Image: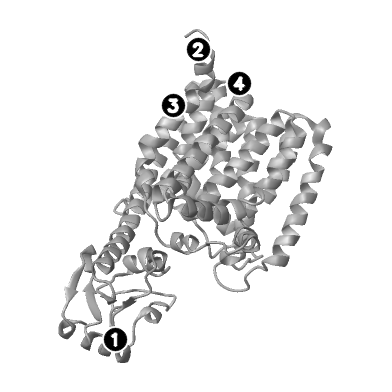
Amino acid sequence: MATLHPRLIRYGPALLACGFLVCVYWRGLDTWFYQDDFGWLHLGPAKSFGDFLHIIFAPKAHGNVRPWSENAYFYALKALFGIDSVPFRVVVYATVMANLFLLDSILRRLTGSAWAAFAGLIFWLASPGIAPGLCWSSIYNQALSTFFLLLSLLLLMQRRWRAHVIVFALGLGSLETVVMYPAIAALYLWLYDRAQLRRVLPLFAISAAFTVLHFLVAPSAKTGPYAMQFDARILRTFWSYLEMALGPERLGHFYWMWPAWVVPALTAAMLAGLLAALLLAGRAGVLGAGWFVLILAPVLLLPDHVMDYLLFAPAVGVAIVLACALSRRPRSFAAVALFYVACGLPATWHIVRWNYERSQISRTLVLGVVEYSRAHPGKTLLLTGMDTDQFHAGYADLPFELFGMKNVFLAPGGDAKIQDSTGIAPLYVLAPDKAGPLLAAGRAVILDISGGQLREVPAAKAE
């Protein structure tokens, strides 16, 4: 037992944080597939080695090049386990747990304190920005890119230069925002070891080359939410993300009955606390603030695509600032730390619950229809009573084709309850001149799926 004692001291806090992760986010382990997940599950199987390389490395949704965090993730797990959400969830949680161990090592070096490092892990886990990434398989890129960023910084701290460059280069295949890491590395060395600044210059060249290559193979969108905008909205977008990162704004989404002044007042109080922490934390505070701003910088060019999950990695910077301030003034700063956690944890709990319930809408719809189809082979299934949540969570991305089914459509008028700003819902409706003969011949059946219940509807009573 004596030989285990030093290891428990070294790894105990990170293990406790892993336990905290499971206690708070346990619903995420049972979250099923929904929305974009089905699009990614359509990858493969590869018909040749060249086809395999194309699946893994070719640009996919929205022109992104993310071979590890999207293409390989979905391709490999589907090939090994089929349409089973559990392995996907396990990989996400294992990656986040690895992130906790890496962040623990980094914070110990910055604060010189095991308990302050542990507090930093809790700060990160309490951030509402990481909650969606623990529920939605499609944004595994957030967890994996954070892993590469943290591992790169830890290797830099350890002065393992060659491994540092390799890990950073690999990280570019997880998410485009990793191109900002060289600026973080330069900031760290400028703060702690300026004589070594020249060693990170090659990283800037790698980032520049990757950026050029990315825009060559996947040109940026000219219109829509993914179109980059270089205008004054950058500042407004930054404030939107900062407001979400502070916590009260996310919490207010679930307590909308509060007086209008409550959320702005709580946000202002937390902002004041964070600024005080930044001043108190010294060099480490500058590093944490730099981490937050630099990783967030690329998405500030997308003012029409402000998403809370894009705070997954930047939230590490907030945790660094708070943990380092707490290590310097534990008694006087404890109230700010508790306030941050008190705002963040309830919000994360509600965000996880919302995502979990959305996945259950998808699971009930998809598996219910699949089960019915297998019990009634040869039938064309016409769905009616579908609402907006059912459509977007479990229908629009063609989940039934993953089960070999191309016989599921919306019945004529089956899109009546769907609020769809994209205008794609009518495209899924089987035209009356095609549905009518199938129903008359007994080769089709109308299924009412309203309320999550599956019921056969006589053709004469269908909408």
Q: Which residue is mark 3?
A: 16
| Residue at figure coordinates x 76%, y 34% from the top left | 161
Amino acid bearing label 1: Ala
Quadrant showing the C terminus: bottom left
Callout 2 touching callout 4 (CB < 8 Å): no
Callout 4 touching callout 1 (CB < 8 Å): no
Amino acid bearing label 2: His
Callout 4: SS? loop
Which is nearer the eye, 220 or 383? 383
Q: Residues within 10 Å of mark 4 (few under 14, many from 20)?
A: few
Amino acid bearing label 3: Leu
Q: Which residue is mark 2?
A: 5
Numbered label tally = 4
Mark-to-mark CA distance, 3 and 4: 19 Å
**2 or 1: mark nearer the eye:** 1
| Residue at figure coordinates x 67%, y 31% from the top left | 283
Amino acid bearing label 4: Gly
Image check: 362 left or right of 147? left
Mark-to-mark CA distance, 2 and 4: 19 Å
Q: Which residue is mark 1?
A: 435
x then y, percent, for residue 363: 32, 58
Q: Residues within 10 Å of mark 1 (few under 14, many from 20)?
A: many
Sequence order check, earlier mark of 1 and 3 = 3
Q: Which residue is mark 4?
A: 112
Sequence order check, earlier mark of 2 and 4 = 2
**1 or 3: mark nearer the eye:** 1
